[in-house]
Amino acid sequence: MVWRSCVTVCVLALLHGAAQAQVTENWVSLFNPPGAEEWTDMAMDAAGNVYVTGRHWGEGTVHYVTARYSPDGDLLWAQQFGTTSVPIEDDAVHLALDSCGCVYLTCKAPGPTTSWDIATVKYSPEGEELWVEYVDGQGREDQGRALAVTSGGVVVAGTAFTNNGGTRYVTIQYDGEGRKEWAHVYTPAFNSGGPLAVAVDAQDNVIVLAVTYDSNGSPDFLLLKYCCQGELLWSRVYGGYGPDFPEDLALDEVGNIYAAGFGYGTFPGTLDLILLAYDPDGEMLWEQIWDSPNHDWEHGGFVAVHETGVYWGGKAFTTLPGHNSTYQLFKYSFSGEELWWYSKGDTLSHHILEDMAVDAQGNVYLTGRRTLHYAVGEDGVTVKVGPDGVEQWAVTYAGASNSIDEALVIALDGEGNPAVAGQTHVEPVYQAFVVKYGTCLSAAPDPVADRAALQPLTVSPNPFNPETALGYRLSAPGWVSLQVYDTAGRETAKLVNGWQDAGAHEVTFDGAGLPSGIYFVRLQAGEGMAVQKIVLLK
C-alpha cells in the first residue's frame, strides 16, 4: 500500500475576482411545470445541445423527466417516464448519450409485473421514445444504477433482489434496437451493495465498479470485467484499513482501469481519498491514499483520464477552527506519480464538490455548492483549472436571494464550454436549472467576501537551518493566515493572522526550537490556499 500525504506544492486557487480568464453566463433555464424537480444527470454533445434527466414531483406523483435544450438554451423537448406515487431515491435515474444524439436512461421504475424493475429507455434525438426494456429480479426493489454506450448499443448495470432477500448484481447489454445481447448475474458473498459505475473500452469489454461487503459488514471496492460477449473475465475486491466506499470509474486508451473513492483513514477517526489503478488483466498497477496535512475527513471521489494523465477529485472537511470543507483536485501520471495538487476553499464557507469533467486540452471543470458560515442559503460554484493546475476562473450561480442553489452535475461541449445542472429553491418548491457558461476577457470582482489572490508561495532556503524566508504576493487586499504544521497535523507556528494589503510579503520562520524533519507551511488568503513542504536540517 502506498500512503500519500501532502508532500508537494498545492497549486493555488487564483480567486474569482482576479482570475487570469473570466467566464460569462450565456443562459439559464428553469424547468417550470407544476411541482418540484431536480436534474441529477446530464450530457452535452459537441454542438452544445444539453440533455438532462432527474425527478419531478407533481400532485401526489413522482416520475422521471428527461429534456433536451438547444445550444442557445431553448427547450426542444421533455419526456416523462415511470410515474408512481412512491418516493424515488435521488440517484435513481442515469443518462448516457450516443454519437447519433440518442439518449439512454436506466432507472428503477414500476415494471409490468412487479413493484420495481431495472428499466432501460431509449429516446431519439427528437425525443421520441424508441423502446423500453425491463429486467425483473423477482424482488421488489430492482434498480438500474449505471450505464454506458457501446459501439452498437448500451450496457446497463443494476441491482436485483430475490424473493428471499438476496442481492444480485446484474449487467445487461442491449443493441440499438433494444434486443438483449447478453446478461450476467454476479452473486456477492454477502447480500448487500450494488453497482455504482460502468465503462466500456475500445474492444467493447465492460468494466463495472460496485460496492460489496465482507463478513463483518464492511464495504469494499469490487471490480468486474466482462468481455464483449458477456463472459466474466475477472473480479477484484479491494479493502484497506476499514470500510472503503467506491465512487467513480474511468479507463485510459490502453484499457487500464482507475477507480476512485474513500475509506477509513490512516489517522484514527478520519477518512482518506483512495485512487486505484489496474491493468486490463486486473493486476493492480498502483494505489494512492491521500490524507491532508491536518488529517481532515476526505470523502467523495471522482476520476477522469486525459492523454496527459489521471485527474482525481474529492472533498475535504477540516477539523481545524472554522470547520470548512474544500474542493480537492490532483493530477497523476500514468505511473502513479503526483504531478500537482489544487485546493479550493476558504475559512468562511463549505465548498462541497459534486462533479467534474475534463476537456480535450486537459482543462478540468469542478462544480458543487458553497455554504457561507455567516449567510443563509447555498450557491453553486464552478471552477476551471488548467492542465498545469492553475485556476483559470471561478463562477458562482446564485438564484433568488438567500435561496438554496445546488450545482450537481456538469458536462462540456466540443469547445470545452461547460453547462451545469441541479436544483434551485424558488418558493414554494425546488426547480431544476441548467446554466451554460462561455468565456470572456474581463473579470468582475465577487462581492460575497473579501478576497486576496495569491501568487505561488516561495521558500528560501529549503532545506534550511534554522531560518527560512516565506514569500508570497497578494494581488488584492484581504485576510491572510500563515501557519506551520508538523507531519502529525499539529500547529507549530502561527506567523500571520490578519488583514494585509496587496503586494509582496515576506515572513521569516525560525525553527530553532523545533527538531529536524518535514513541516508544512499553509497559506490561506480569501478563497486561495497553498501548502508547501519545508525541511528543517540541523
Image (spheres, grey):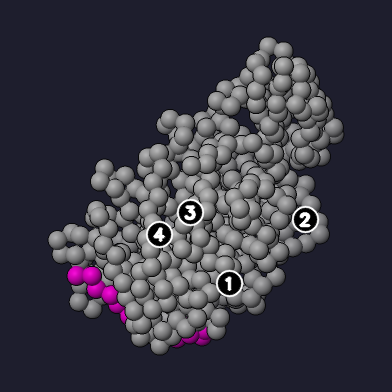
| Residue 407 image offset from top left, x and y in percent | 54, 56
Along the polypeptide, which appears first: circle 3 or circle 4? Answer: 4
Mark 3 residue element: strand
Residue under label 2: 21
- Would residue 317 be seen by someone viewing this image from the given angle? no
Residue under label 3: 284
What range is drawn magenta here?
124-138
Q: Rate crowding at label 3 as few (under 14), some (14 to 19) or many (20 or more) other CA atoms within 10 Å.
A: some
Is 398 or 152 nearer to us in this picture? 152
Q: Amino acid at mark 3?
A: Met
Along the polypeptide, which appears first: circle 4 or circle 2? Answer: 2
Distance, label 2 to label 3, CA atoms, is 39 Å
Residue drawn at the location 76% of the way across and 35% of the way down? 457
Mark 1 residue element: strand
Q: Find residue 223 and name its label.
A: 4
Distance, label 1 to label 3, CA atoms, is 33 Å
Task: Classify residue 367 by image quadrant.
Answer: bottom right
Residue drawn at the location 42% of the way across and 77% of the way down? 228
Residue under label 1: 44
Mark 2 residue element: loop
